[in-house]
Image (cartoon, coloured by chain):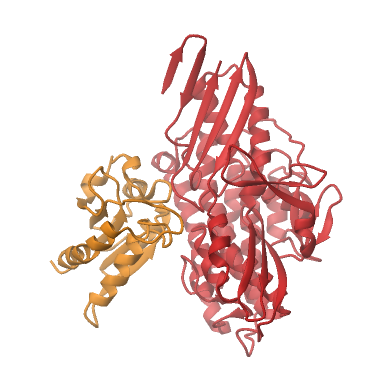
C-alpha cells in the first residue's frame, strides 16, 4: 500500500513473506539518499537464556531445541558441546559421528526448504513455493523428495523429526545397530543424484553481479568441512579457541531492535553461514559436492550473497555424502553416551546451524545447575551485515519504484536465510521517502 | 493409518501451544488399541503434506485468528480452506496451514477429508503458557475432535 503526502511517501507491507519468524525492516530515503536501514528481529534466545538459569545441566539440550522448529539439532549440539566442555566430558568416535549424521539431516531439510520455498521463487519470479509448484511441479517434488531424506535421518537418529528426543549430554539415549541404518543408507544413495541435480538447477539462475566485502566467520575442525568444530576462524586472521569467542565477539544493543547485534571487537561486522563455511573450507567438500560446485562455477570463495543458493545446494550434497560415509563406517558402540559427572565449571560450544555459527556458553554450579547461559544465534550475528547489504542494495537501486524496491530488498534479506523463526509471524518492511 | 489428528504449534509460545496441548489431552482420552495417529507438527507446510497424504481423514488443530473471542472454536472443512487469507492463520510458521492446503492441492497430496479445528488465541508470547480462555476451551475442543474421528 502506498500513501503519498506532500514531499514524502511512505510504503509498508504486511509481511516479508518467506522469512522464518518475525521481524521488521525500515528503510528511510531522504533527498534521494539512503538515510537509515534498520532491521528489527525479535529473538527468543534472550528469553531462553533467562529461562535456563537454575535448571539442571541436562535440560538445555531439550529446552533450547524448542527455540527453532527448523534447526533444533543445532541448538541441541551447541548446548551439549558446551555443557560437556564445562563438565570435562569428551564425546568422540562413533558418538560424535552419529551427531554429525543427525546434523546432516538438519542441513538437508533446512537448506532444501530454503532453496525451494524461500529462495528459488525469487529468482524465477514467483511469489512463493506454492506458486512455483503450480508451474514447476516436478522441480518442487524433487525438492520434497530430497528434503524427506533429511527428515528420515532425524526420525532414525533423533527419534522423531520435530524436536528430536534422542539427544542428551554425553551422547544419545539410544544408538542404532548397523542394520537399522541400512534402509536410511539406501535412501541416501538413491536421492544423492537428485541433490546433485538441484545444484545444477540453481546454478542456472540469473544472478545479480554483487560481490560484497564480507569478513567471513565460521567454526573450524582440523580436517572436516565445518559442522561441529573446536575453533572459530575468519578469513582475515581470526583463529581462536571456542572459549575465547566472547573475548572477540561483542553483542550490543541497538535502539531499533529487541535483538542484540554482534560484531568483532575492533574489526566490525561479519558474516556467518554457508558463504563463510564454503569460502573457508571449500577444498574439504565431499567429492560429489566439490564436483557440483565446480560445475556450478563457484570459485574457491563466494562473496555474492545471491549465489548462496548454490552454496546451500552444494552443502546438501556434502551432507548426503557425509551421512553415507558415517553409515558406512558405523560400528555400534557399547554405550550410547559417555558418563557425565556434574561439577562446577564453565563451558563453550559452537556448531554450524544451517544458517551459521551458533555459540552457547554455560556456567554450571557445583550442584549441576545452570548459573548462567549465553546463546549467540547466527541471525543476530548477521543482522548488521544484512543491514549493510540492504543499504548497499537500496543505494544502488533508488530508481526502482517502491514496490520493486521492496520486493528486491526482501530478496537481499532472504539471501542470508535469517532464522527469525525462532519466533512467530513475519517481517514488516517499511520504506519511507522524503 | 487411515486417520490422523495433527496438533500444530509450539509449547512455550503462549496459545501457539494449544495444538500440542490438545494432542496430550486427546492421547489421554483415546481408548487403548485405537487406530488413529496422533502427532504434533510445527506447521511447516511440507511436513504437513507429507504427514497427511494418502489418508482418509485428517483432523488438524491449530491456533486460528478469525476475529472471534479468545478460546472460540472454529470448525473448517478443507474446501473452505483454499483461498483463506494466510493472515488469518495465527500459526507461528510462515504460510502454515493455508499454504499447506494450497501446496497439497497442486501436488495432489491432500487427504480425502481434512477438517480443521481452529481455536482463537489470546496471546502468543514467547515463554508464556496457555491463556485461561484457551485452556478452558481444550476439553470442548477434544470432545469435538473425538466426535469427528468417530463419526
Vertical placement of A137 versus A12: above or below?
A: below
Residue at x-position 32% and y-position 71%: B24
Q: Position of residue A416 (x, y in %)?
A: 62, 44
Pick out the residue farthest to the right.
A237
Seen in the image, is B4 located left or right of residue A38?
A: left
Quarter of the image for residue A373 reads bottom right
Q: Position of residue A297 (x, y in %)?
A: 72, 42
Residue at x-position 64% and y-position 22%: A34
Q: Is residue A365 visible?
A: yes
The quadrant of the rendering that contains the C terminus of chain A is top right
The residue lying toward the viewer, choosing from A230 and A259, is A259
* Chain A, chosen colour in render: red
Q: Is residue A149 visible?
A: no
Residue at x-position 61% and y-position 17%: A30
* Chain B, chosen colour in render: orange
Residue at x-position 28% and y-position 71%: B25
Seen in the image, is A333 located left or right of residue B44?
A: right
Seen in the image, is A357 located left or right of residue A40?
A: right
Quarter of the image for residue A1 reads top left
The number of numbered badges drawn on the structure is 0
The residue lying toward the viewer, choosing from A144 and A408, is A408
Vertical placement of A282 versus A121: above or below?
A: below
Pick out the residue farthest to the left.
B151
Vertical placement of B50 versus A62: above or below?
A: above
Pick out the residue farthest to the top.
A6
Vertical placement of A235 versus A330: above or below?
A: above
Q: Position of residue A200 (x, y in %)?
A: 61, 46
Amino acid at each position: 500500500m502506498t500513501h503519498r503526502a506532500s514531499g514524502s511517501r511512505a510504503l509498508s507491507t504486511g509481511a516479508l513473506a518467506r522469512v522464518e519468524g518475525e521481524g521488521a525492516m525500515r528503510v528511510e530515503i531522504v533527498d534521494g539518499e539512503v538515510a537509515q536501514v534498520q532491521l528489527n528481529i525479535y529473538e527468543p534466545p534472550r528469553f531462553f537464556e533467562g529461562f535456563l538459569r537454575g535448571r539442571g545441566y541436562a535440560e538445555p539440550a531439550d529446552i533450547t531445541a524448542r527455540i527453532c522448529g527448523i534447526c533444533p539439532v543445532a541448538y541441541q549440539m551447541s548446548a551439549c558441546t558446551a555443557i560437556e566442555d564445562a563438565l570435562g566430558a569428551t564425546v568422540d568416535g562413533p558418538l560424535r559421528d552419529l551427531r554429525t549424521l543427525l546434523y546432516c539431516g538438519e542441513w538437508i531439510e533446512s537448506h532444501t526448504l530454503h532453496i525451494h520455498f524461500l529462495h528459488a521463487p525469487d529468482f524465477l519470479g514467483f511469489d512463493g513455493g506454492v506458486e512455483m509448484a503450480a508451474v514447476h511441479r516436478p522441480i518442487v517434488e524433487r525438492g520434497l523428495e530430497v528434503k524427506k531424506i533429511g527428515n528420515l535421518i532425524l526420525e532414525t537418529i533423533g527419534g522423531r523429526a520435530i524436536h528430536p528426543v534422542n539427544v542428551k549430554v554425553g551422547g544419545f539415549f539410544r544408538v542404532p545397530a548397523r542394520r537399522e541404518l541400512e534402509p536410511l543408507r539406501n535412501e541416501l544413495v538413491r536421492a544423492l543424484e537428485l541433490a546433485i541435480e538441484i545444484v545444477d538447477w540453481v546454478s542456472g539462475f540469473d544472478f545479480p553481479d554483487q560481490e560484497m566485502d564480507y569478513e567471513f566467520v565460521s567454526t573450524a575442525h582440523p580436517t572436516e568441512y565445518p559442522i561441529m568444530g573446536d575453533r572459530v576462524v575468519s578469513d582475515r586472521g581470526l583463529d581462536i579457541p571456542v572459549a575465547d569467542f566472547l573475548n572477540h565477539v561483542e553483542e550490543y544493543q541497538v535502539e531499533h531492535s529487541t535483538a542484540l547485534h554482534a560484531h568483532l571487537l575492533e574489526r566490525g561486522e561479519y558474516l556467518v553461514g554457508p558463504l563463510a563455511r564454503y569460502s573457508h573450507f571449500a577444498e574439504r567438500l565431499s567429492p560429489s559436492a566439490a564436483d557440483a560446485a565446480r560445475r556450478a562455477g563457484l570459485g574457491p570463495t563466494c562473496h555474492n550473497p545471491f549465489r548462496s543458493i548454490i552454496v546451500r545446494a552444494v552443502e546438501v550434497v556434502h551432507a548426503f555424502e557425509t551421512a553415507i560415509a558415517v553409515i558406512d563406517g558405523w560400528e555400534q558402540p557399547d554405550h550410547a553416551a559417555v558418563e557425565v559427572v556434574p561439577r562446577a565449571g564453565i563451558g563453550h560450544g559452537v556448531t554450524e546451524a544451517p544458517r551459521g555459527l551458533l555459540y552457547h556458553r554455560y556456567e554450571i554450579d557445583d550442584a549441576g545447575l545452570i548459573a548462567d547461559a549465553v546463546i549467540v544465534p547466527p541471525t543476530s550475528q548477521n543482522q548488521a551485515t544484512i543491514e549493510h547489504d540492504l543499504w548497499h542494495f537500496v543505494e544502488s537501486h533508488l530508481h526502482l519504484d517502491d514496490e520493486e524496491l521492496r520486493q528486491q530488498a526482501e530478496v537481499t534479506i532472504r539471501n542470508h536465510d535469517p532464522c527469525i523463526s525462532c519466533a512467530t509471524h513475519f517481517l514488516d518492511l517499511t520504506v519511507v521517502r522524503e | 493409518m487411515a486417520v490422523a489428528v495433527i496438533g500444530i504449534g509450539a509449547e512455550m509460545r503462549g496459545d501457539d501451544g494449544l495444538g500440542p496441548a490438545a494432542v496430550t489431552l486427546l492421547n489421554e482420552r483415546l481408548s487403548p488399541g485405537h487406530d488413529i495417529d496422533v502427532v504434533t507438527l510445527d506447521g511447516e507446510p511440507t511436513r504437513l503434506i507429507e504427514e497427511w497424504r494418502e489418508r482418509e481423514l485428517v483432523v488438524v488443530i491449530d491456533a486460528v485468528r478469525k476475529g472471534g473471542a479468545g478460546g472460540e472454536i472454529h470448525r473448517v472443512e478443507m474446501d473452505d480452506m483454499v483461498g483463506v487469507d494466510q493472515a488469518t492463520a495465527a500459526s507461528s510458521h510462515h504460510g502454515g496451514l493455508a499454504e499447506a492446503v494450497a501446496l497439497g492441492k497442486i501436488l495432489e497430496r491432500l487427504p480425502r477429508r481434512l477438517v480443521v479445528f481452529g481455536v482463537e488465541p489470546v496471546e502468543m508470547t514467547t515463554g508464556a503458557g496457555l491463556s485461561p480462555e484457551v485452556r478452558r476451551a481444550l476439553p470442548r475442543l477434544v470432545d469435538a475432535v473425538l466426535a469427528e474421528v468417530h463419526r
